[in-house]
């Protein structure tokens, strides 16, 4: 029972202090924060939802068994099928 942080993480530190079990850290071998699978409880018994995912600003950075807790479009409000178009418009400015 543990979540994972993948390489979409931008190392913003937002999740680190929220973790009730101190499970989030940045090992020297990785370019991004990781979750200690031995101590992550998915916040069970402490909070209604995983605190790291509740504050993470990056869609897809925190996953449970390969499923993003903040899937594409959930934070930006931009439907995934419109993201490419939105990004192209942004880059052309
Ligand atoms: S789910 Fe909870 S216990 Fe696990 S890393 Fe995230 S904040 Fe920490
Ligand atoms: S809140 Fe998200 S982006 Fe920020 S350090 Fe944690 S996992 Fe990485």
Image (tube, rainbow, N blue to C red):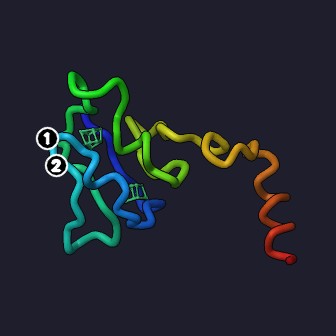
Image coords of residue 59 (percent x, y): 55, 49
91 vs 41: above or below: below
Extreme residue toward the left, this view: 38
Q: What's the distance in space between the residues labelled 1 and 2, CA to CA? A: 8 Å
Residue placed under numbered mark 1 in the picture: 39
Residue at 47% in and 37% down:
69
The x, y position of residue 88, in whole percent, is: 83, 67
Q: Is mark 2 within 8 Å of ligand 1?
A: yes
Ligand 1 shows up in the quarter that is: top left
Q: Residue furthest bottom?
A: 93
The label on residue 22 is 2
Tell me what residue is drawn at x 52 percent, y 54 percent. Answer: 58
Tag 1 near tag 2, CB within 8 Å: yes
The quarter of the image holding the N terminus is top left
Q: Are there few (<14), some (14-19), or many (20+) residues within 10 Å of tag 1?
A: few
- Front residue of 45/27: it is 45
Q: Where is 79 relative to 7, above or below?
A: above
Question: Which is more N-terminal, label 2 or label 1?
Answer: 2
Residue 16 or residue 38, whichever sits in front: 16
Label 1 C-beta lies within 8 Å of the nearest ligand 1 atom: yes
Compared across the picture, whether 78 is left or right of 59 comes to: right
Say left or right for 9 vs 34.
Answer: right
**The C terminus, quarter of image:** bottom right
Q: Secondary structure at mark 2?
A: loop
Q: Residue at coordinates 20% horizontally, 74% vertically from top-left?
A: 28
Mark 1 or mark 2: which is in front? 2
Residue appearing at x 79%, y 58% in the figure: 84
- Name the quadrant containing residue 66: top left
Q: Position of residue 51 (x, y in %)?
A: 34, 39
Task: From the top left corner, tell me how far across and down residue 54 is, in percent.
Answer: 43, 40
């Amino acid at each position: 029972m543990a979540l994972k942080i993948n390489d979409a993480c931008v190392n913003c530190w937002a999740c680190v202090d929220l973790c009730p079990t101190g499970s989030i850290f940045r090992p020297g071998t990785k370019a991004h924060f990781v979750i200690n699978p031995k101590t992550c409880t998915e916040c069970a018994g402490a909070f209604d939802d995983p605190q790291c995912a509740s504050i993470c600003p990056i869609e897809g950075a925190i996953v449970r068994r390969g499923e993003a807790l903040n899937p594409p479009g959930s934070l930006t409000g931009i439907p995934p099928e419109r993201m490419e178009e939105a990004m192209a418009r942004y880059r052309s400015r």
